[in-house]
Image (spheres, rainbow, N blue to C red):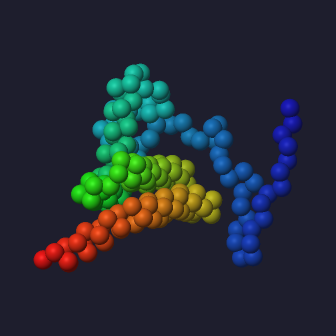
């Protein structure tokens, strides 16, 4: 079976041309074990590509991912704090269940996007190592953009839900000394 020839991508003026196949195939990715400087965590998961043997182990892996993001990603911690504040204000202001669900869902979406962003950045860093590649930049920028979009939507939802009862409470406090 013949492989179809695809012309190499052309670069803008003054840039190096992009390789014809910037994404490595599984055969091109080195299969040697990671050296100790690249291993994270406790090192008990050397065969990370294996499927978890049961649900409890799957939850442990998921918790390890959340823990890693919380320990290493400043923006994840900021979004956790903002989400807790938003849900706490919803409870304090006694918003409806539907409004509380909207606050929780949008906060959860932001945290999920942060986790995906961290995963994408980690994989891109693993693949390009210390070398600059325009496609790596695009992948990382797009992942960060997804977080930004979700955070903006969550902010708008929080403003629409929390601002009216907050203003009513402030007005009520100003009238009744």
Q: Which residue is more in the foreground, 122 or 171?
A: 171
- Considering every residue shown, the one lying at the far left of the view is 177
Residue 164 image point, x, y percent: 36, 67
Q: Quadrant of the C terminus?
A: bottom left
What residue is drawn where x is 31% and y is 45%?
67
What residue is drawn where x is 49% and y is 32%?
49
What residue is drawn where x is 75% and y is 76%?
13
Residue 149 image point, x, y percent: 51, 62
- Considering every residue shown, the one lying at the far front of the view is 176
Residue 111 image point, x, y percent: 40, 52
- Inspect this view and state whether residue 105 appears: yes
- Inspect this view and state whether residue 125 appears: no
Q: Quadrant of the N terminus?
A: top right
- Considering every residue shown, the one lying at the far top of the view is 53
Residue 113 image point, x, y percent: 47, 52
Question: Can you say whether 145 is above or below 52 in the image?
Answer: below
Q: Which residue is more in the foreground, 175 or 40?
A: 175
Is 37 placed left or right of 51 in the picture?
left
Is 154 placed left or right of 30 in the picture?
left
Q: Quadrant of residue 44?
A: top left
Is 140 placed left or right of 104 in the picture?
right
What residue is drawn where x is 41% and y is 43%?
35
Is 160 placed left or right of 140 in the picture?
left
Number of numbered discs overlaid on the protein picture? 0
Q: Quadrant of residue 61?
A: top left
């Amino acid at each position: 079976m013949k492989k179809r020839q695809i012309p190499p991508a052309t670069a803008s003026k003054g840039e190096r041309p992009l390789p014809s196949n910037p994404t490595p195939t599984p055969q091109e990715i080195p299969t040697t074990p990671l050296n100790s400087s690249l291993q994270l965590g406790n090192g008990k998961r050397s065969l990370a590509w294996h499927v978890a043997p049961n649900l409890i182990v799957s939850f442990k892996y998921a918790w390890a991912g959340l823990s890693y993001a919380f320990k290493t990603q400043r923006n994840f911690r900021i979004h956790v704090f903002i989400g807790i504040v938003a849900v706490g204000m919803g409870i304090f202001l006694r918003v409806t269940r539907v409004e509380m669900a909207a606050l929780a869902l949008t906060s959860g979406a932001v945290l999920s996007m942060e986790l995906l962003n961290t995963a994408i950045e980690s994989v891109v860093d693993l693949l390009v190592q210390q070398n600059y590649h325009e496609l790596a930049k695009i992948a990382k920028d797009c992942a960060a953009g997804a977080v930004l979009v979700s955070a903006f939507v969550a902010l708008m939802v929080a403003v629409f839900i929390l601002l009216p009862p907050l203003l009513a409470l402030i007005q009520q406090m100003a009238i009744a000394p």
